[in-house]
Amino acid sequence: MFCFIIAVKSKAVSKNWARVCELFEAALRSTYHQIDPDFKIIVVCHDTPEVSGTYDGRVEYINVDFPPPRQPIRNY
């Protein structure tokens, strides 16, 4: 089994939460196109991203309880 870990920017520090969700879902779709279906995706986030697609139990969300960084790392 292969494991992908995706960290998602906090809604509080993102300038465009909808864009963050779009990029996150693009990463999910890309991961689901793997040849081998034996994988797991762990998503680490402050806020669970909004997605339009349906994803199975291979996606696990871990919501952290520490404060987000004060300064955004990128401008999206």
Image (cartoon, rainbow, N blue to C red):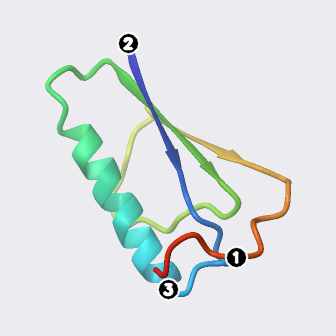
Which class describes the residues within 10 Å of circle 2: few (<14), some (14-19), or many (20+)?
Answer: few
Residue shown at the point (55%, 58%) measured from the top left: 8
Q: CA distance from mark 2 to mark 3?
A: 34 Å
**Residue 12 spot, x, y in % from top left:** 70, 78
In the rendering, which numbered label is found on residue 1?
2
N-term-proximal mark, 2 vs 1: 2
Q: Residue pushed farthest bottom?
A: 15
**Residue 20 spot, x, y in % from top left:** 45, 72
Question: Disc 2 vs disc 1: which is toward the camera?
Answer: 1
Q: CA distance from mark 2 to mark 1?
A: 36 Å
Question: Disc 2 vs disc 3: which is toward the camera?
Answer: 3
Q: Amino acid at mark 1?
A: Gln
Which class describes the residues within 10 Å of circle 1: few (<14), some (14-19), or many (20+)?
Answer: few
Q: Amino acid at mark 3?
A: Asn
Residue shown at the point (36%, 66%) measured from the top left: 23
N-term-proximal mark, 2 vs 3: 2
Residue shown at the point (44%, 70%) measured from the top left: 21
**Towards the viewer: 58 or 9:** 9
Residue shown at the point (36%, 71%) measured from the top left: 22
Q: Which residue is mark 3?
A: 16
70 relative position to 47: left or right: right
Q: Quadrant of residue 45?
A: bottom right
Identify the image quadrant of the N terminus.
top left
N-term-proximal mark, 3 vs 1: 3
**Towards the viewer: 51 or 16:** 16
Q: In the structure shown, which secondary structural element does the residue marked by tag 1 occupy?
A: loop
Q: Residue pushed farthest top?
A: 1
